[in-house]
């Protein structure tokens, strides 16, 4: 009965939906109303209450709301709005607080990106690695896998005798790895390796795990 009493207090133009939203604009009411009608089938009590209200207030009609279509002067208003938006800002225009906040959020990101583009090590540029102020996805790897990924990508962190016998990217060319585990290096091996050590580092991780390269083939490192 509380639901019925609440419904009586609403405006006749109110659209009631299961998520308790009361009003919508544009064409959304039509789809909301259709969904509400379908959801009413799940509750026989609510369905009976709505049927009772419908009998009291007469038939309910759902009509399409065209929005801004065919409204006299609407196209002219849109054209004027676009023309006004394309005009240069006045020299003495005072920025809004929202505009200043947006600039304050954007400028550090722009400055950080510009710094990285000019200061990034050559090897990082070759791999297409981008610096980020948030946690990079590589840090989700185990410490052992991350070590091998960084060593192969930066050429640092391995022992001298390993560099004499192999190269940090030897895993991509080693013949002891089964063919079905190897990374496809065509058409450009250098580009394929760079991608596997950069943004597509998942390929390097899958290769290491599938081949057990650092457990069987090269266990010391």
Image (cartoon, rainbow, N blue to C red):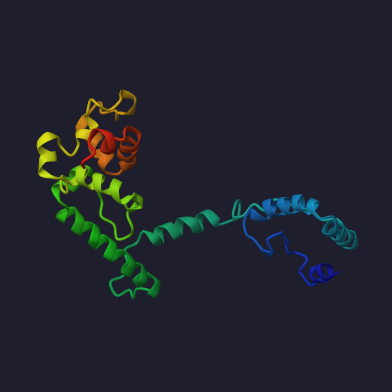
Residue drawn at (28%, 62%), measured in percent from left and top? 109
Where is residue 212, by image quadrant?
top left
126 vs 89: above or below: above
Image quadrant containing the N terminus: bottom right
Locate residue 210 relative to residue 110 in the image: left or right.
right
Q: Position of residue 167 (x, y in %)?
A: 15, 37
160 vs 6: above or below: above
45 vs 163: above or below: below
63 vs 95: above or below: above
In terms of depth relative to the viewer, which is nearer, 41 or 178?
Answer: 178
Image quadrant containing the C terminus: top left
Locate residue 39 relative to residue 198 in the image: left or right.
right
Locate residue 99 relative to residue 34 in the image: left or right.
left
Where is residue 3, by image quadrant?
bottom right
In terms of depth relative to the viewer, which is nearer, 45 or 6?
Answer: 45
Q: Position of residue 122 (x, y in %)?
A: 14, 47
Residue drawn at (20%, 56%), measured in percent from left and top? 116
In terms of depth relative to the viewer, which is nearer, 158 or 149?
Answer: 158
In terms of depth relative to the viewer, which is nearer, 159 or 27?
Answer: 159
Q: Position of residue 189 (x, y in %)?
A: 21, 30
């Amino acid at each position: 009965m509380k639901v019925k009493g609440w419904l009586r207090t609403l405006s006749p133009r109110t659209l009631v939906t299961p998520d308790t939203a009361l009003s919508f604009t544009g064409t959304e009411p039509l789809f909301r109303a259709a969904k509400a009608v379908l959801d009413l089938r799940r509750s026989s009590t609510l369905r009976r209450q709505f049927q009772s209200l419908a009998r009291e207030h007469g038939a309910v009609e759902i009509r399409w709301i065209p929005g801004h279509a065919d409204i006299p002067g609407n196209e002219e208003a849109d054209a004027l709005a676009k023309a006004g938006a394309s005009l240069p800002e006045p020299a003495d225009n005072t920025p809004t607080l929202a505009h200043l906040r947006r600039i304050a959020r954007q400028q550090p990101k722009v400055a950080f990106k510009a710094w990285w583009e000019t200061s990034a090590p050559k090897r990082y540029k070759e791999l297409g690695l981008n610096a980020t102020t948030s946690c990079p996805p590589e840090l989700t790897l185990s410490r052992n896998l991350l070590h091998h990924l960084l060593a192969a990508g930066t050429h640092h962190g391995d022992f001298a005798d390993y560099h004499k016998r192999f190269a940090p990217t030897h895993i991509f060319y080693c013949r002891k790895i089964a063919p079905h585990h190897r990374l496809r290096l065509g058409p450009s091996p250098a580009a394929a390796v760079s991608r596997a050590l950069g943004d597509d580092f998942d390929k390097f991780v899958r290769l290491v795990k599938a081949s057990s390269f650092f457990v069987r083939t090269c266990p010391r490192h």
